[in-house]
Amino acid sequence: MSHLAIYPSLEGQTVLLTGGAGGIGAEIVRGFARQGAKVGFVDLDETAAAEVAQETGAQYEIADLRDIEALQTAFANLIKDLGAPKVLVNNAARDDRHDWTDVTPDYYDERIAVNLKHMFFATQACAPEMIKSGQGGSIINMGSNSWWEASGGMPVYTTSKSAVHGMTRSFARDLGPHRIRCNTVVPGWIMTERQKELWVTEEALDRHLSNQCTPDPIQPYEVANMVLWLAADDSSACTANNFFVEAGSV
C-alpha cells in the first residue's frame, strides 16, 4: 500500500486504541505504525496482541474492557511508557447476533459494556492527558452502519452503536475548547476474518453488495485510512461528525 498517504503530523505522536489485536483494529495499528507513530493498544487476546506487536513495534496491555478498573490501569501503563496521547481510537466491539426475545437484563448490560461503556471511560482516562499536553488531540469512536440501515438480529449491539454518536457529539462540545476533536467512523460490512468465518456467504455478500453504490467488498484497511485522516492535522476543522466507510450502502 505504498500509494497511500503519509501524514507528517502523526510521526512520533502517541496513539492509543482499544481492540488492536485483530480485524479493523489490527489494521489501524499497522496504519499508525507506517506513519511513524508510537502506538499502544489494549486487548484481551494475548496471543494475537503479541503477533501484532511483533509485526508493528506497537506496545500492548492485556485487559478485559468490561472491567473498567483494568481498562484504566492499562491506559495508565501505556501513557506512562509512551507519553500523553495525541490520538485515541475507541475501536473495540463485538457484533454478536442475538434474538430480542432472548435478551436478559444481564446479557443487555454485558453487551453495553462490550460495545459502549468502555469508550466513555477510555476517553475519561486519556482526555485529561491530552488537555495537560496543550497540544490538542483527536478522539475517534467506531460506530456502525448497521443501525442506520435498520438491521435486525442484534438489537443490543445496534442500540449501543447508535449511542456512540451521541457520546461523540457531547465530548466534541466539552473537549473542543482544548482543541480536542471527537468524531465517529461508521463502517459498513467490512471483510474481516471474523465476518468471513461467521457470516459471509456468497448469497449474503451478493445481497449486500447490491445495496452498495460501488461494487467491491470493503476491506479493513479502508476503515483504517479514514481513521488516519481524522487523527492527522489534515482534518483539523472536523469534529462532532460521522464519517462513513460503507460504499454508499442503504
Image (tube, rainbow, N blue to C red):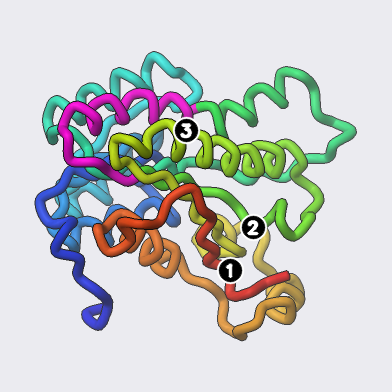
Seen from the viewer's position, the closer of residues 249 and 63 is: 249
Q: Name the quadrant containing residue 111.
A: top right
Residue on which disc 1 sits: 246
x and y, in percent, of residue 198 in the image: 64, 56
Q: Quadrant of the N terminus?
A: bottom left
x and y, in percent, of residue 99 in the image: 83, 40
Crowd rating for badge 3 (residues with CA inside 10 Å; few <14, some 14–19, many 20+): many
Seen from the viewer's position, the closer of residues 208 and 192 is: 208
Membership of 147 in magenta stretch: no
* Number of marks in picture: 3
Residue type at tag 1: Glu
Task: Identify the mark nearer the N-term, 3 or 2.
Answer: 3
Q: CA distance from mark 2 to mark 1?
A: 7 Å
Task: Identify the mark nearer the N-term, 2 or 1.
Answer: 2
Residue on which disc 3 sits: 119
Residue on which disc 2 sits: 145
Name the residue at 18% across, 50% down: 54
Marks 3 & 2, CB-CB < 8 Å contact: no
Region rendered in magenta: 118-138
Task: Identify the mark nearer the N-term, 1 or 3.
Answer: 3
